[in-house]
Image: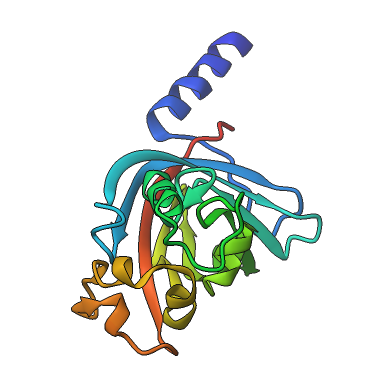
């Protein structure tokens, strides 16, 4: 009888998707979500964007007040300027205020504020390279969990300060980088403006069983 009952429970879970999900405010929690990730670039010359299946991992710290997202941005590290382009700019002597061994600006992972049991507010990156900091990078967004699903209710957006971009990148490149939202080249935008570079949207289902 015990074997039969156990088999029925497992069968029911297979059909109904039984999963045990930790709330975001639980200390030392870890949840894995599988779903679709959309990446849009505001500067087509840097990236064409992407639509792909993806795995997102969310962990919380010991207080349950802070969470970390691995999987957005999708690469680790995520380069803001393509590495091949960066190499060409370096070889041509066009980079400004850049050390001999400085890699292209890059970031990894996200840090979040836990807002209740179901909501995460993106507040920063887990890791930023020296040049990413010098670009005046900012990140924002919000994820919410409903049942076994998690989704971005506010797109995760990476933005940069125009003046700091001008201080780092050559004018010849900035003239070619067309910002689709502002409808003009980066070089023509005001220095005090914060412009979007990348936007991410994720929706997925929990994959942690029981």
Measured as percent of width and height from the top left, residue 38 is found at: 31, 52
Q: Quadrant of residue 127?
A: bottom right
**Is 153 above or below relative to 67?**
below
Up/down of 204 relative to 200, above or below = above
Q: Which of the image's four quarters has the C terminus? A: top right
Q: Residue at x 36, y 63 (%)?
A: 199
Say which residue appears at 38% left-offset and 48% top-offset. 88
Does residue 117 appear in this view?
A: no
- Is 200 displayed left or right of 79 in the figure? left
Task: Kindly give the residue lying farthest to the right in the view shown.
Answer: 62
Q: Residue at x 31, y 85 (%)?
A: 189
User: Is residue 197 visible from the viewing direction of this image?
Assistant: yes
- The colouring scheme, among rainbow, by chain, secondary structure or one colour, is rainbow
- Examine the image and state in which quarter residue 116 appears: bottom right
**Residue 142 on image: x %, y %:** 48, 68
Q: Camera-side residue: 13 or 121?
A: 121
What is the number of callouts on the image?
0
**Which percent across, then down, holds residue 87?**
43, 46
Q: Can you say which quadrant of the picture contains the N terminus?
A: top right
Q: Residue, x 59% and y 9% (percent of image)?
A: 3
User: Residue 98 appears in which quarter of the rendering?
Assistant: bottom right
Residue 171 coordinates in the image, percent (x, y): 34, 73
């Amino acid at each position: 009888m015990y074997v039969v009952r156990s088999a029925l429970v497992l069968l029911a879970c297979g059909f109904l998707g039984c999963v045990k999900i930790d709330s975001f405010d639980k200390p030392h929690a870890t949840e894995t979500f599988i779903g679709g990730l959309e990446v849009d670039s505001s500067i087509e010359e840097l990236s064409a964007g992407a639509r792909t299946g993806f795995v997102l991992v969310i962990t919380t710290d010991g207080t349950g007040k802070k969470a970390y997202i691995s999987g957005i941005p999708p690469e680790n590290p995520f380069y803001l300027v393509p590495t091949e382009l960066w190499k060409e700019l370096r070889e041509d002597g066009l980079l400004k205020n850049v050390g001999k061994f400085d890699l292209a600006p890059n970031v990894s992972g996200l840090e979040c504020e836990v807002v209740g049991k179901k909501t995460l507010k993106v507040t920063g990156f887990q890791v930023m390279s020296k040049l990413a900091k010098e670009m005046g990078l900012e990140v924002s967004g919000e994820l919410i969990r409903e049942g076994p699903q998690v989704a971005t209710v506010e797109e995760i957006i990476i933005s940069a300060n125009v003046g700091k971009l001008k201080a780092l990148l050559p004018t010849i490149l900035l003239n070619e980088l067309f910002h689709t939202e502002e409808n003009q080249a980066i070089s023509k935008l005001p220095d005090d403006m914060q412009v979007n570079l990348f936007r991410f949207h994720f929706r997925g289902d929990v994959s942690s069983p029981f």
